[in-house]
Each structure stands twice: as C-alpha cells, then as structure tokens.
Amino acid sequence: MGAGCGHELQFDGLSAGYKRALIAVILINGIMFGVEIVAGHLGHSVALQADALDFFGDTATYALSLFVIGMSVKARSSVAFFKGITLLLMGMWILGSTVYRVFVVAEPEAVIMSGIGLLALAANVASVIILMAYRDGDANVRSVWLCSRNDAIGNVAVVAAGGLVALTGTRWPDLAVALIMAGLFTWSATQILKQSLHEYRHHGDHSHDEEAHSHSGAE
C-alpha cells in the first residue's frame, strides 16, 4: 500500500484534483458527524458515538491536511505527527467510554445502530473511492487514506453489531465494536507516527547535507 516508512517521499498532495477530492471528503465527514452524534445519543449507542467522534476528528484533520499542502516537508510531517497523536487520544477516549458503558443499564437501539451504520458506511466508502487514486504519498497524504479506509472497516463492524444487539438483546456487541474501533485508531496512529517521524528526520538529515555541501562549495 504505498509509501512506507522506509520509502522515498512520493505524492505530496500538490494537485488540484487531490484538493478537490479532499474538500469533498471533508464535507462528507462533517455532515456525518452531525448525523451520528445525534443518532448515537438517541440510540444509546457508544459505537455510534465513537464513530461520530471519528467523523469529527477526520473533518478537522483533513482540513488541516488541506491547509498544509504545498508547505515544507517538515511542516507536513509535523502535521501528520499531530494527527497521529490525535488519533491515539481518540482511541483512548473510546476505550474509556466503552469501559464506562459496561455500568450503564440502557441498551443500544439496534435499528438506529444498523440504519445509521449503513449510512456511515456509504459515506466512508464514497470517501475511499474518491481518495483511491491518492492512497500513496507522504505521511500527510497517506494519513487521510488510512483514516478513510479504516473508517469503512469500522462501519461494517457497527452494522454487524446492530444485528447482534437485536439477536442477543444485550449491549455487548456494541461494546465489542467500540473496542475494535479503539484498536483501529491506535493502529492507524502508529502507522502515521512512524512515517511522519521518518520523513521529519530524513528531511532534517537532507537539509544538513545540503547545508554542508553549500559551505564546502563556497570554500
């Protein structure tokens, strides 16, 4: 899947097509955040609330990704590192909310979970399709792809949990999905942090070499 931590930098997002794609994905995520935060509250579903938080985080970080396009490698890798830390914190929040949910009596509404989960899945699949041509690149570009791809996987799990909640009459499937999503957040954060650190350090070494070469040439 594209630019790993040991690879040279590839696509940096500096194209009109990618910017249009990113704007479309930002709009999709912003709308779905509003839909899911309301549905998660009404349906007593921590999985939907966790997914809503995911949409909010994606909206903010994708907007940040758009903002830094065209800036230096160090600036873009720094933003990607920040996005990785944010994903890690979100994963911890979801995990904490899931543990708390064990002690709450209200059961999640299976119909709301499945219905909104399908809508969220459609939104994330649309985002994945839009971004498919831009899945390889630097940490800033790749972080957008990883988040969208993992979101689609998470939505499949939410829909499945809705069906299991209906079948079992318990909240445990909802809790299990929230834990899986926390794991996805953590895994994505790890990938982004590794690549952004590599790019930041590589750029620093490259800049140092260029500076040394320039001094030697002047002499």
Image: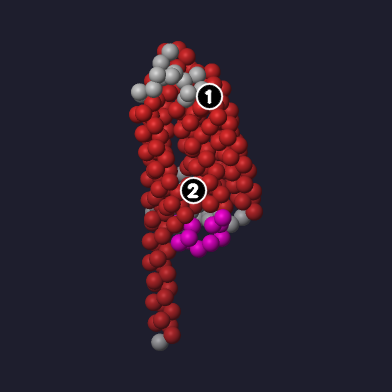
Q: Which residue is mark 2?
A: 142
Q: Quadrant of the C terminus?
A: bottom left
Q: Is residue 194 magenta?
A: no
Residue 34 in sight in this render: yes
Q: Which residue is mark 1?
A: 42
Residue 91, percent across and down?
A: 40, 38
Magenta residues, dominant SS class = helix
Q: Which residues are magenta?
A: 67-77
Q: Is residue 34 above or below residue 111?
A: below
Q: Residue at x 53, y 46 (%)?
A: 60
Q: Nearer the viewer, residue 199 or 63?
A: 63
Q: Is residue 216 left or right of residue 43?
A: left
Q: Residue at x 41, y 16 (%)?
A: 170
Q: Nearer the viewer, residue 48 or 190?
A: 48
| Residue mark closest to the camera, 1 vs 2 | 1
- Residue type pointed to by label 2: Arg
SS category of the residue bearing label 1: helix
Residue 191 in sight in this render: no
Residue 79, percent across and down?
A: 47, 54
Q: Residue at x 49, y 52 (%)?
A: 140
Q: Is residue 203 above or below residue 173?
A: below
Q: Is residue 208 above or below residue 154?
A: below
Task: Using a 10 Å C-alpha cutoff, classify the residue at mark 1 as few (fewer than 14 neighbours), some (14 to 19) or many (20 or more).
Answer: few
- Residue type pointed to by label 1: Leu
The answer to whether mark 1 and mark 2 are in CB contact below 8 A is no
Give residue 172's quadrant in the image. Answer: top left
Residue 157, percent across and down?
A: 46, 26
